[in-house]
Image (spheres, rainbow, N blue to C red):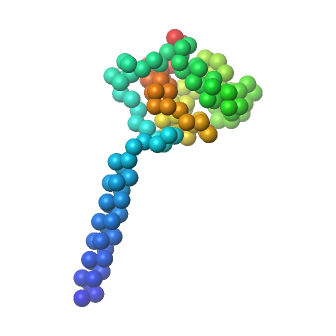
Amino acid sequence: MKKWSFLILLAAVVWVACSKSADSSSSATTPNSPMPSPSPSDCSAVDSKFSTNVSAIIQSSCTGSGCHNAGSTNGPGALTNFAQISANATAIRQSVESGRMPRGITLSTAQRNAISCWVMAGAPNN
């Protein structure tokens, strides 16, 4: 009898744990939560030019917040010009996609996609 009670209890715990996991995975992405990388085909409709979009996002969200302005030693350091930003493009993409950065600021999905697509395109100075 004790074995059956234990097995029933264990099955109930596993069922509850699995149902909670399935519920949480179907919820919508919240700001600064990890997001999937856009596929290259998704990038065809994204404005991911450095000069018109990516630079402005980084200037307002990363340097404007005081975290990566001139003289910064945070993370990759200053992100004030193309050379500094492109040298750290992969790390920037990973931080944005994971939701770790920018701290205290919520990027829109369009802004996150612009950065990701720019990096996937080879981080060109366009």
Q: Nearer the viewer, residue 46 or 2?
A: 46
Horizontal relation, residue 35 to residue 72: left or right: left
Q: Is residue 126 above or below residue 59?
A: above
Q: Nearer the viewer, residue 13 or 95?
A: 13
The total number of labels drawn is 0
Horizontal relation, residue 53 to residue 5: left or right: right
Q: Picture quarter containing residue 69? A: top right
Inspect this view and state whether residue 87 appears: no
**Residue furthest right as drawn:** 71
**Residue furthest top as drawn:** 126
Horizontal relation, residue 5 to residue 97: left or right: left
Percent of width and height locating residue 29: 42, 42
Percent of width and height locating residue 124: 50, 15
Q: Picture quarter containing residue 11? A: bottom left
**Residue furthest bottom as drawn:** 1
Percent of width and height locating residue 16: 33, 65
Which residue is painted at 39% across and 22% down in the image?
43
Q: Is residue 47 above or below residue 103?
A: above
Q: Nearer the viewer, residue 12 or 123?
A: 12
Percent of width and height locating residue 108: 49, 31
Q: Quadrant of the N terminus?
A: bottom left
Which residue is painted at 63% across and 29% down in the image?
62
Q: Nearer the viewer, residue 98 or 111?
A: 111
Which residue is painted at 30% across and 80% down in the image?
6
Inspect this view and state whether residue 103 appears: yes
